[in-house]
Amino acid sequence: MVKIFIDPGHGGKDAGAEANNLREKDVTLDISKRIKRYLDHHYDGHTTRLSRTKDTTLTLSERTNDANQWGADYFLSIHINAGGGTGYEDYIFDGHVSNRTISMRNTIHREVIKQMKHVTNRGKKRANLHVVRESTMSSMLGEVLFIDTKQDAQKLKDGTFKDNVAKGYSIGLAKALSLQKDSNPSNKAAKKKQKKGYKWLGTNLKGKRVESIYRGKEGLNYYDGPRWNNPSGTFGYGEGWKVDNKYLVDGSPMYRVQNSKGDLYFITASTKNVRVI
């Protein structure tokens, strides 16, 4: 089983670069999750792990130590550039690396550029960066556009563009790691949902606001998929989004909710923790 470690850059107290109403830590997490979803949906023979699944503070050493101890076969770190430029570039270590590392980076770079439309190719580069130096497996760090360049920032706000970025990374990783393509991904997704007890219930509350009434210290969890572990973030008391639909997940009800950007998440539908306005 091939192990792929995806590292969304920055997080928690470290927001990374900020401009055009975007924070690097949010965009890197979004793209990383899209890569994981695409890989898991379209390819067999691998397992995917993220260094963080929510807005968590991690040191560089914690990221590489996690990947090394897990025994990852590839380490991919996702970042967003800044400094007034435009386009895409990626990095491998500027010290000694194997020919396989170079070849794999070339493959991934080619597929990412192929999926991006009208984006400047800034090239394949090398640098003494911690995550590509201290990871014991082949590794690469990608810089996806410039957060402080208006036209690049507009692309980074576009879900379709980010899906294409994720597709490029996924196809590149699959080719570089010789993953087998799933011949029936829709059937795979259906089986996965069925296995997890994922069932559509429906609701007449679509469009209404659902708020957290949970007063716990850590806040009410929300998730980027129908599950009860690895939350994507938390709501404070009184915070919430619009109801989109309702499901039964592992025997307990969940609302699928939509935020102001149109992104879909899942939260508990328990009246002990939420109320619909």
Image (spheres, rainbow, N blue to C red):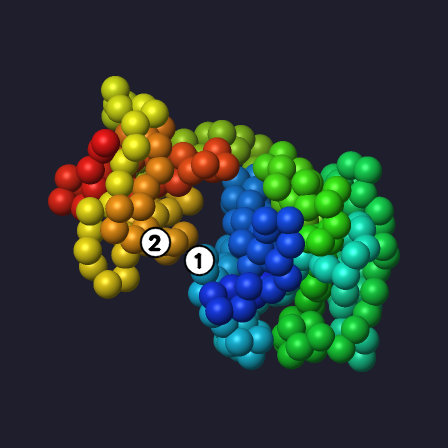
Residue 88, percent from left and from top: 78, 52
Q: Where is residue 249 shown, x and y percent of the image?
A: 27, 39
Of the residues tagged 1 and 2, which is closer to the observer?
2
Crowding near the residue tagged with mark 2, few <14, some 14–19, many ≥20 C-alpha atoms within 10 Å: some
Question: Rounded to the nearest whole Å, what is the CA distance between mark 1 and mark 2?
Answer: 9 Å
Q: Does label 1 or label 2 sit earlier along the sequence?
A: 1
Q: Residue at x 80, y 51 (%)?
A: 86
Residue under numbered circle 1: 54
Q: Which residue is mark 2?
A: 234
Q: Quadrant of residue 171?
A: top right
- At a point 57% along the width and 42% down the height, the residue shown is 38
Quarter of the picture containing the C terminus is: top left
Q: Position of residue 95 (x, y in %)?
A: 80, 79
State how many labels appear. 2
Q: Let me know if residue 191 appears in the view.
A: no
Q: Secondary structure at mark 1?
A: loop
Q: Is residue 273 left or right of residue 79?
A: left
129 vs 169: above or below = below
> Residue at left 18%, top 41%?
270
User: Looking at the image, which is closer to me, 96 or 126?
Assistant: 126
Residue type (three-letter) at the residue carrying disc 1: Lys
Question: In the visual, does 129 lie left or right of 16?
Answer: right
The reply to whether dot 1 and dot 2 touch (C-beta < 8 Å) is yes
